[in-house]
Image: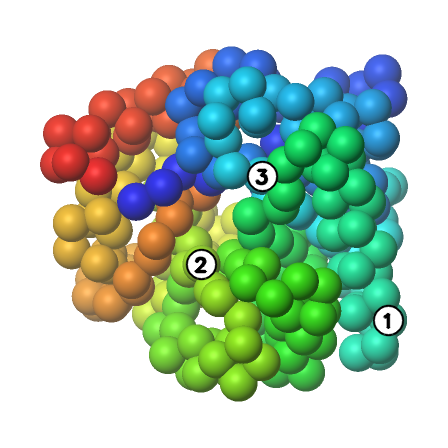
Amino acid sequence: MKLNCDLGESYGAWTMGQDELVMPWIDMANIACGFHASDPLIMHKTVAMALKHGVDIGAHPSYHDLAGFGRRSIVHTADEVVALMLYQIGALEGICRAENCRLAYVKPHGALNNDMMKDARLLQAVMESVARYRPGLALMIPVTRGYSDHQSLADRVGLPLIFEAFADRAYDDNGHLVSRSQSGAVHHDPDVIVSQALSFAEKGGITSVSGQWLDLPATSLCVHGDNDHALAAVKAIRAALQTIGQ
């Protein structure tokens, strides 16, 4: 079970997250590509930091929404989605090439990520953009109860998938994240977060908010390290996973 984290989300003089502190504890860095956060200098610094710690580099593209941090839905045609994906992936890949490395995967950000899991047309466009960019480049998507259908769709376009789960978020009966607007959607207790991480790693799923068991075969856990409590949770998850040989 690999740990991934959204990084490189600062912008100019504005700092977001604790990238230098969290990078040594993760396996995969989802690096912002300039559309919801980041800029060329921050992208370059984050790539160099990932290389220093042996962390896989992933592109973290979004809708073009700097003011809203990529959290606002924007209506696009399928061709527009493909173009915005290719543009951002290419920008980060260019920096990687200059550092003699390459992208390992792509993980859509924010509203784009949420929207594509509800709209088959949008998900198809995202998958096709990644498959067209480079054969073998993987796409990271949230694991839900519809994971087998998503895998079949990816297989048709020849796209490797990475299924992602969250240790610090509650899930509904369909395997979707409970909206942040609802009480209890985000776990803050480190013991609960570690327990959920271990459930994904050892049992291949978790229990929903209503008590229903969910088979969710994730291969990567998204963790957050944007404050001291979150960073402590990352370290606790890493230590717990090491005890079971993950």
Which class describes the residues within 10 Å of circle 3: few (<14), some (14-19), or many (20+)?
many
Q: What is the C-alpha distance between the residues marked 2 and 3? A: 14 Å
Helix, strand or loop at disc 3?
A: strand
- Closer to the chain start, of discs 3 and 1, is 3
Q: What is the C-alpha distance between the residues marked 2 and 1? A: 24 Å
Q: Which residue is mark 1?
A: 80
| Residue ID at (62%, 32%) | 7
Residue 60 rendering spot, x and y as whole percentages:
66, 47
Quadrant in which residue 99 is drawn: top right
Q: Which residue is mark 3?
A: 57
Quadrant in which residue 237 is drawn: top left
Nearer to the camera, 117 or 52: 52
- Closer to the chain start, of discs 2 and 1, is 1
| Colouring used for the render | rainbow
In the image, farthest residue toward the left: 244
Q: Amino acid at mark 1?
A: Glu
Q: Quadrant of the N terminus?
A: top left
Q: Would residue 126 be found to the left or right of residue 180 on screen?
A: right
Q: Amino acid at mark 2?
A: Ile
Q: Amino acid at mark 3?
A: Ile
Q: Which mark is residue 162?
A: 2
Q: Are marks 2 and 1 in contact (CB under 8 Å)?
A: no
Q: Are marks 3 and 1 in contact (CB under 8 Å)?
A: no
Residue 232 rendering spot, x and y as whole percentages:
37, 18
Q: What is the C-alpha distance between the residues marked 3 and 1? A: 25 Å
Residue 66 rendering spot, x and y as whole percentages:
85, 42
Residue 196, visible in the rendered structure: no
| Residue ID at (79%, 60%) | 86
Vertical position of residue 137 compared to residue 80: above or below:
above
Which class describes the residues within 10 Å of circle 2: few (<14), some (14-19), or many (20+)?
some
